[in-house]
């Protein structure tokens, strides 16, 4: 049985110039297979708002819902690091609420939390979480919880100045104690600059090839959620067709009387 992946394992990967993989999962059995496949970090992304709950944006998912998915995923994972994405408003109002909500995810089996954005307040939240024993994955560039203030799904860090600003924020988050930083929808050359100037690992979500790690939404990888697929996602399977075909054959067999057969009855 391989050893449990920790913040130290991921830092070692960065220090040695290696790469690690991050995939989202939202249920027990999917998390189990992703873990068995050797993926290093399993993220209970707030993307579950769209892909598992059918909401329009991540704003609609709450702490109670993230807690249910965290519990299920954590039960399925033995080896990978389990990270819960903290939902909108769960860490923004005050530091004690942030510690309470993030701590609850650790209590349910997560090994770390992910929080989006940058401000003096967020730096204080990161410091307090880390000093409470809660590892923090930061998230910069396009941050979906800021969709309305960013004015849409826009690439961030396109100019040299804006790339340097993301780097400054990432360095402050690193100083505050974050163990890694997701860079979402950032041009590859900007992500390269940021990665080369940070000590902690960077995790690309549409930020190109130079980051320490790559993260994708598992429903995109499996070809399951097909209402919208970002340009940077790669589809490795066609679960939508698999589910459709299985459901169709079952429906036909029930209606024709082919299911159940002699050996499927008591
Ligand atoms: O919600 C999510 O799934 C994410 C990752 C894709 C980074 O935040």
Image: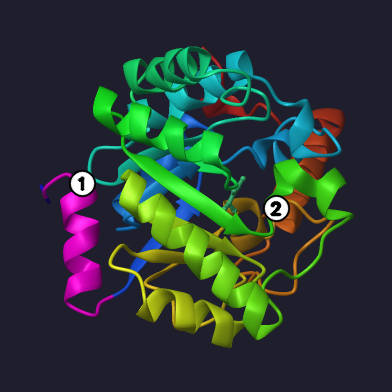
Q: Quadrant of residue 207?
A: bottom right
In the visual, does 179 lie left or right of 3? right
Crowd around label 1: few <14 · some 14–19 · many ≥20 (10 Å): some
Q: Which mark is residue 224?
A: 2
Give neighbour class at mark 2: few <14, some 14-19, many 20+ (Cα, 10 Å): some
Q: Is residue 26 left or right of residue 155?
A: left
Q: In the rendered structure, does residue 13 fall within the stretch colored magenta?
A: yes
Q: Quadrant of residue 107?
A: top left
Residue 110 in view here = no
Q: Nearer the viewer, residue 187 or 63?
A: 187
Q: Is residue 93 magenta?
A: no
- Secondary structure of the residue carrying numbered label 2: loop
- In this rendering, the answer to whether 93 lies above or below 185 is above
Q: Toward which corner of the image does residue 78 lie, by quadrant?
A: top left
Q: Is residue 97 visible?
A: yes
Reply above or below: 19 against 101. Answer: below
Relative to residue 13, is residue 55 depicted above or below? above
Q: Position of residue 2 (x, y in %)?
A: 12, 51
Comparing 140 with 238, the one in front is: 140
Q: Are marks 2 and 1 in contact (CB under 8 Å)?
A: no
Residue on which the image places disc 1: 6
Relative depth, front residue between 131 and 254: 131
Residue found 71% across the figure and 26% down from its top:
61
Residue at left 47%, top 26%? Answer: 70
Residue drawn at x 67%, y 20% as measured from the top left: 62
Q: Which residues are magenta?
A: 3-18
- Horizontally, residue 248 falls left or right of residue 186, namely right
Who's the residue at 41% across and 75% down the image? 195
């Amino acid at each position: 049985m391989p050893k449990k992946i920790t913040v130290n394992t991921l830092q070692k990967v960065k220090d040695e110039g290696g790469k690690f993989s991050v995939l989202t999962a939202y249920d027990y059995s999917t998390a189990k297979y992703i873990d068995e496949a050797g993926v290093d970090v399993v993220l209970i992304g707030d993307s579950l708002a769209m892909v598992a709950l059918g909401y329009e944006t991540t704003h609609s998912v709450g702490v109670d819902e993230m807690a249910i998915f965290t519990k299920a995923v954590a039960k399925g994972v033995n080896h990978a690091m389990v990270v819960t994405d903290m939902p909108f408003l769960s860490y923004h109002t005050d530091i004690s609420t942030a510690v309470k909500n993030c701590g609850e995810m650790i209590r349910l089996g997560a090994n770390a939390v992910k929080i989006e954005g940058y401000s003096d307040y967020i730096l204080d939240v990161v410091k307090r979480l880390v000093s409470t024993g809660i590892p923090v994955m930061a998230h910069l560039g396009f941050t979906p919880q800021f969709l309305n203030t960013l004015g849409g799904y826009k690439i961030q860090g396109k100019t040299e100045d804006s790339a340097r600003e993301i780097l400054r924020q990432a360095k402050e988050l690193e100083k505050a104690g974050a163990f890694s930083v997701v860079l979402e929808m950032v041009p590859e050359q900007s992500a390269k600059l940021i990665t080369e100037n940070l000590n902690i690992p960077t995790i690309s979500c549409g930020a190109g090839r130079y980051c320490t790690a790559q993260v994708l939404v598992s429903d995109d990888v499996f070809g399951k959620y097909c209402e919208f697929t970002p340009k940077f996602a790669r589809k490795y399977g066609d679960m939508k067709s698999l589910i459709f075909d299985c459901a169709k054959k079952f429906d036909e067999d029930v209606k024709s009387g082919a299911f159940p057969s002699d050996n499927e009855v008591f």
